[in-house]
Image (cartoon, rainbow, N blue to C red):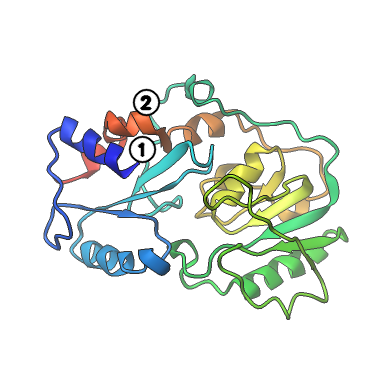
Amino acid sequence: MLEAFARGCALHGIELVANSRDAAAAMIWSVLWHGRMQANREIYQHYRSLGRPVICMDIGALDRGRTWKIALNNITRDGYYGHEQDLDPDRPAKLGICIKTPTRPKPAVLIALQHPRSLQVQGVDQVAWAAEQIKKLRQVSDLPILIRQHPRGPVDLARLKSVAAEQVTRPVAGTYDSFDIDYGYRAVINYNSGVGVQAAMAGAQIRVDATSLAAPISIDLTDINSDHSKDRSQWLIEISHTEYLIEEIAQGTWLKRIGHQLVL
Protein backbone atom coordinates (compact mmCIF):
# COMPACT_ATOMS: atom_id res chain seq x y z
CA MET A 1 0.00 0.00 0.00
CA LEU A 2 2.84 2.42 0.84
CA GLU A 3 4.55 1.46 -2.42
CA ALA A 4 1.33 2.34 -4.24
CA PHE A 5 1.30 5.70 -2.45
CA ALA A 6 4.86 6.39 -3.62
CA ARG A 7 3.98 5.48 -7.21
CA GLY A 8 0.96 7.78 -7.15
CA CYS A 9 3.06 10.67 -5.86
CA ALA A 10 5.75 10.10 -8.48
CA LEU A 11 3.10 9.99 -11.21
CA HIS A 12 2.00 13.49 -10.20
CA GLY A 13 5.48 14.93 -9.79
CA ILE A 14 5.57 14.87 -6.00
CA GLU A 15 9.00 14.20 -4.52
CA LEU A 16 9.13 12.02 -1.40
CA VAL A 17 11.92 12.37 1.18
CA ALA A 18 12.37 10.08 4.16
CA ASN A 19 12.36 11.31 7.75
CA SER A 20 12.56 15.01 6.90
CA ARG A 21 11.43 17.58 9.46
CA ASP A 22 11.25 20.38 6.92
CA ALA A 23 9.10 19.08 4.08
CA ALA A 24 6.04 20.90 2.77
CA ALA A 25 3.87 18.14 4.22
CA ALA A 26 4.28 14.88 6.13
CA MET A 27 2.75 11.46 5.58
CA ILE A 28 2.21 9.01 8.43
CA TRP A 29 0.65 5.59 8.68
CA SER A 30 -2.08 5.58 11.35
CA VAL A 31 -2.83 7.98 14.21
CA LEU A 32 -2.53 5.19 16.77
CA TRP A 33 0.42 6.27 18.92
CA HIS A 34 1.40 2.75 19.92
CA GLY A 35 4.09 0.19 19.13
CA ARG A 36 5.96 0.83 15.89
CA MET A 37 3.66 3.79 15.19
CA GLN A 38 4.35 5.60 18.46
CA ALA A 39 7.06 7.78 16.86
CA ASN A 40 4.44 9.13 14.44
CA ARG A 41 3.02 11.25 17.23
CA GLU A 42 6.09 13.49 17.41
CA ILE A 43 6.15 13.87 13.61
CA TYR A 44 2.44 14.71 13.60
CA GLN A 45 2.78 17.30 16.36
CA HIS A 46 5.89 18.84 14.75
CA TYR A 47 4.26 19.39 11.36
CA ARG A 48 0.98 20.58 12.80
CA SER A 49 2.85 23.07 15.02
CA LEU A 50 4.36 24.49 11.82
CA GLY A 51 0.91 24.76 10.27
CA ARG A 52 1.84 22.18 7.65
CA PRO A 53 -0.51 19.38 6.59
CA VAL A 54 -0.11 15.76 7.60
CA ILE A 55 -1.41 13.09 5.23
CA CYS A 56 -2.86 10.35 7.42
CA MET A 57 -3.28 6.89 5.99
CA ASP A 58 -4.97 3.94 7.67
CA ILE A 59 -6.76 0.71 7.00
CA GLY A 60 -10.27 1.38 5.74
CA ALA A 61 -13.60 0.74 7.40
CA LEU A 62 -15.64 0.25 4.21
CA ASP A 63 -13.94 -2.99 3.17
CA ARG A 64 -11.16 -3.66 5.66
CA GLY A 65 -7.98 -4.81 3.95
CA ARG A 66 -9.26 -3.80 0.51
CA THR A 67 -9.99 -0.08 0.86
CA TRP A 68 -7.65 2.38 2.54
CA LYS A 69 -8.33 5.70 4.22
CA ILE A 70 -6.45 8.86 3.18
CA ALA A 71 -7.14 12.23 4.82
CA LEU A 72 -5.44 15.40 5.95
CA ASN A 73 -4.61 15.97 9.62
CA ASN A 74 -6.88 13.31 11.13
CA ILE A 75 -8.88 10.21 10.20
CA THR A 76 -12.01 11.38 12.02
CA ARG A 77 -14.52 13.92 10.75
CA ASP A 78 -12.04 16.56 11.94
CA GLY A 79 -9.79 15.51 9.06
CA TYR A 80 -10.22 16.65 5.45
CA TYR A 81 -11.26 14.13 2.79
CA GLY A 82 -12.85 16.34 0.15
CA HIS A 83 -15.80 13.95 0.24
CA GLU A 84 -18.69 16.40 0.22
CA GLN A 85 -18.41 17.83 -3.29
CA ASP A 86 -17.91 16.62 -6.89
CA LEU A 87 -19.29 13.22 -5.94
CA ASP A 88 -19.68 10.14 -8.12
CA PRO A 89 -23.07 8.63 -7.20
CA ASP A 90 -21.94 5.27 -8.58
CA ARG A 91 -18.83 5.02 -6.41
CA PRO A 92 -20.40 2.73 -3.75
CA ALA A 93 -21.22 0.22 -6.49
CA LYS A 94 -17.71 0.56 -7.93
CA LEU A 95 -16.28 -0.27 -4.51
CA GLY A 96 -18.80 -3.05 -4.02
CA ILE A 97 -20.26 -1.61 -0.81
CA CYS A 98 -23.85 -1.11 0.29
CA ILE A 99 -26.06 -0.64 3.34
CA LYS A 100 -27.28 -4.02 4.50
CA THR A 101 -30.77 -4.67 5.77
CA PRO A 102 -30.65 -5.97 9.36
CA THR A 103 -32.55 -9.15 10.12
CA ARG A 104 -34.14 -9.51 13.55
CA PRO A 105 -31.61 -7.48 15.59
CA LYS A 106 -31.01 -8.79 19.09
CA PRO A 107 -32.76 -6.78 21.84
CA ALA A 108 -29.62 -5.25 23.31
CA VAL A 109 -27.27 -2.29 22.83
CA LEU A 110 -23.57 -2.62 22.08
CA ILE A 111 -21.06 0.01 23.25
CA ALA A 112 -17.81 -0.35 21.28
CA LEU A 113 -14.64 1.23 22.67
CA GLN A 114 -11.48 2.35 20.86
CA HIS A 115 -7.76 1.96 21.46
CA PRO A 116 -6.97 4.41 24.28
CA ARG A 117 -3.77 5.64 22.59
CA SER A 118 -5.43 6.72 19.38
CA LEU A 119 -5.61 10.38 18.38
CA GLN A 120 -9.30 9.65 17.73
CA VAL A 121 -9.98 9.60 21.48
CA GLN A 122 -7.32 12.02 22.66
CA GLY A 123 -8.36 13.48 26.01
CA VAL A 124 -11.30 11.07 26.37
CA ASP A 125 -11.62 8.78 29.40
CA GLN A 126 -13.43 5.95 27.65
CA VAL A 127 -14.63 4.26 30.81
CA ALA A 128 -16.15 7.55 32.02
CA TRP A 129 -17.59 8.11 28.52
CA ALA A 130 -19.13 4.62 28.47
CA ALA A 131 -20.57 5.14 31.96
CA GLU A 132 -22.19 8.38 30.76
CA GLN A 133 -23.69 6.61 27.73
CA ILE A 134 -25.10 3.92 30.00
CA LYS A 135 -26.56 6.54 32.34
CA LYS A 136 -28.29 8.33 29.44
CA LEU A 137 -29.43 5.07 27.89
CA ARG A 138 -31.02 3.93 31.14
CA GLN A 139 -33.17 7.07 31.14
CA VAL A 140 -34.92 5.93 27.95
CA SER A 141 -34.48 2.15 27.72
CA ASP A 142 -34.09 -1.02 29.78
CA LEU A 143 -32.40 -2.98 26.99
CA PRO A 144 -29.40 -5.13 28.07
CA ILE A 145 -26.02 -3.48 27.42
CA LEU A 146 -22.82 -5.08 26.17
CA ILE A 147 -19.33 -3.54 26.11
CA ARG A 148 -16.84 -4.41 23.39
CA GLN A 149 -13.23 -3.51 24.13
CA HIS A 150 -10.70 -2.69 21.44
CA PRO A 151 -8.95 -6.05 21.01
CA ARG A 152 -5.45 -4.52 21.14
CA GLY A 153 -6.16 -1.77 23.68
CA PRO A 154 -8.16 -3.06 26.65
CA VAL A 155 -9.19 -0.77 29.49
CA ASP A 156 -10.35 -1.53 33.04
CA LEU A 157 -14.07 -2.27 32.91
CA ALA A 158 -14.45 -3.03 36.62
CA ARG A 159 -16.66 0.04 37.11
CA LEU A 160 -19.06 -1.11 34.40
CA LYS A 161 -19.38 -4.85 34.98
CA SER A 162 -22.36 -4.46 37.29
CA VAL A 163 -24.40 -2.78 34.53
CA ALA A 164 -23.02 -4.27 31.31
CA ALA A 165 -21.74 -7.59 30.01
CA GLU A 166 -18.61 -7.85 27.84
CA GLN A 167 -18.70 -8.99 24.22
CA VAL A 168 -15.83 -11.40 23.60
CA THR A 169 -13.72 -10.46 20.56
CA ARG A 170 -11.83 -13.08 18.57
CA PRO A 171 -9.30 -12.77 15.71
CA VAL A 172 -10.60 -13.51 12.22
CA ALA A 173 -8.70 -16.49 10.81
CA GLY A 174 -6.56 -15.75 7.76
CA THR A 175 -6.29 -11.98 8.43
CA TYR A 176 -3.45 -9.87 9.78
CA ASP A 177 -5.29 -7.96 12.51
CA SER A 178 -9.03 -8.21 11.89
CA PHE A 179 -11.36 -9.21 14.71
CA ASP A 180 -14.94 -10.37 14.63
CA ILE A 181 -17.65 -8.07 15.92
CA ASP A 182 -21.38 -8.64 15.99
CA TYR A 183 -23.39 -5.58 14.91
CA GLY A 184 -26.74 -7.35 15.09
CA TYR A 185 -28.12 -5.36 18.01
CA ARG A 186 -30.84 -2.80 18.51
CA ALA A 187 -28.17 -0.11 18.38
CA VAL A 188 -24.41 0.36 18.45
CA ILE A 189 -22.81 3.21 20.40
CA ASN A 190 -19.28 4.26 19.47
CA TYR A 191 -17.19 7.40 19.92
CA ASN A 192 -15.62 7.85 16.50
CA SER A 193 -13.75 4.78 15.23
CA GLY A 194 -14.34 2.66 12.14
CA VAL A 195 -16.84 0.65 14.17
CA GLY A 196 -19.43 3.42 13.80
CA VAL A 197 -19.12 3.31 10.01
CA GLN A 198 -19.13 -0.48 9.87
CA ALA A 199 -22.15 -0.76 12.17
CA ALA A 200 -24.06 1.74 10.02
CA MET A 201 -23.23 -0.23 6.87
CA ALA A 202 -24.37 -3.40 8.63
CA GLY A 203 -27.77 -1.73 9.06
CA ALA A 204 -27.64 -1.10 12.80
CA GLN A 205 -28.89 2.11 14.37
CA ILE A 206 -25.85 4.03 15.59
CA ARG A 207 -25.06 6.66 18.17
CA VAL A 208 -21.66 8.35 17.65
CA ASP A 209 -19.79 11.52 18.58
CA ALA A 210 -19.91 14.59 16.34
CA THR A 211 -16.29 13.86 15.31
CA SER A 212 -17.25 10.49 13.79
CA LEU A 213 -17.53 10.06 10.03
CA ALA A 214 -20.87 8.41 10.77
CA ALA A 215 -22.19 11.50 12.62
CA PRO A 216 -24.60 12.55 9.82
CA ILE A 217 -26.68 9.42 10.41
CA SER A 218 -26.32 9.18 14.19
CA ILE A 219 -29.55 8.88 16.17
CA ASP A 220 -30.53 10.48 19.46
CA LEU A 221 -30.66 8.07 22.37
CA THR A 222 -34.30 9.03 22.81
CA ASP A 223 -34.94 7.24 19.48
CA ILE A 224 -33.33 4.01 20.62
CA ASN A 225 -36.66 2.17 20.74
CA SER A 226 -37.80 3.37 17.33
CA ASP A 227 -37.67 1.22 14.19
CA HIS A 228 -37.09 4.32 12.10
CA SER A 229 -33.53 5.02 10.98
CA LYS A 230 -32.15 7.95 9.00
CA ASP A 231 -31.82 7.76 5.23
CA ARG A 232 -28.25 6.62 4.55
CA SER A 233 -28.14 6.83 0.75
CA GLN A 234 -26.37 10.21 0.52
CA TRP A 235 -24.10 9.36 3.42
CA LEU A 236 -23.02 6.15 1.66
CA ILE A 237 -22.06 8.11 -1.45
CA GLU A 238 -20.08 10.61 0.61
CA ILE A 239 -18.31 8.02 2.79
CA SER A 240 -17.31 6.07 -0.31
CA HIS A 241 -15.11 9.03 -1.29
CA THR A 242 -13.00 8.79 1.90
CA GLU A 243 -11.26 5.52 0.99
CA TYR A 244 -9.39 4.13 -2.01
CA LEU A 245 -8.44 0.87 -3.66
CA ILE A 246 -4.73 0.05 -4.03
CA GLU A 247 -4.83 0.73 -7.76
CA GLU A 248 -6.42 4.13 -7.12
CA ILE A 249 -3.70 5.01 -4.63
CA ALA A 250 -1.08 4.04 -7.21
CA GLN A 251 -2.78 6.39 -9.68
CA GLY A 252 -2.85 9.26 -7.16
CA THR A 253 -6.66 9.43 -7.29
CA TRP A 254 -6.75 10.81 -3.75
CA LEU A 255 -4.89 13.94 -4.93
CA LYS A 256 -7.96 14.98 -6.91
CA ARG A 257 -9.80 15.36 -3.60
CA ILE A 258 -7.26 16.67 -1.11
CA GLY A 259 -4.31 17.75 -3.23
CA HIS A 260 -5.44 21.39 -3.37
CA GLN A 261 -5.02 21.55 0.42
CA LEU A 262 -1.33 20.62 0.17
CA VAL A 263 1.39 23.22 -0.23
CA LEU A 264 3.78 21.31 -2.47
What's under tag 1, amino acid-wise?
Gly
Q: Quadrant of residue 33?
A: bottom left
Residue sitting at the far front: 174
Does residue 84 show up? no
Q: Quadrant of the N terminus?
A: top left
- Which residue sits at x=61%, y=43%? 198
What's under tag 2, amino acid-wise?
Asp
- Which residue sits at x=62%, y=33%? 232
Q: Quadrant of residue 111?
A: bottom right
Mark 1 nearby-residue class (10 Å; few <14, some 14–19, many ≥20): many
Query: Which one is nearer the viewer's eye here, 108 or 6?
Result: 6
Q: Quadrant of the C terminus?
A: top left
Residue at the spot of label 2: 86
Question: Residues at badges 2 and 1 in contact (C-beta under 8 Å)?
Answer: yes
Residue 166 position, x and y percent, is 76, 65
Q: Which mark is residue 82?
A: 1
Residue 191 position, x and y percent, is 58, 59
- Which residue sits at x=82%, y=35%? 103
Q: Which mark is residue 141?
A: none
Q: Is residue 111 above or below residue 213?
A: below
Residue 113 position, x and y percent, is 62, 63
Residue 222 position, x and y percent, is 76, 54
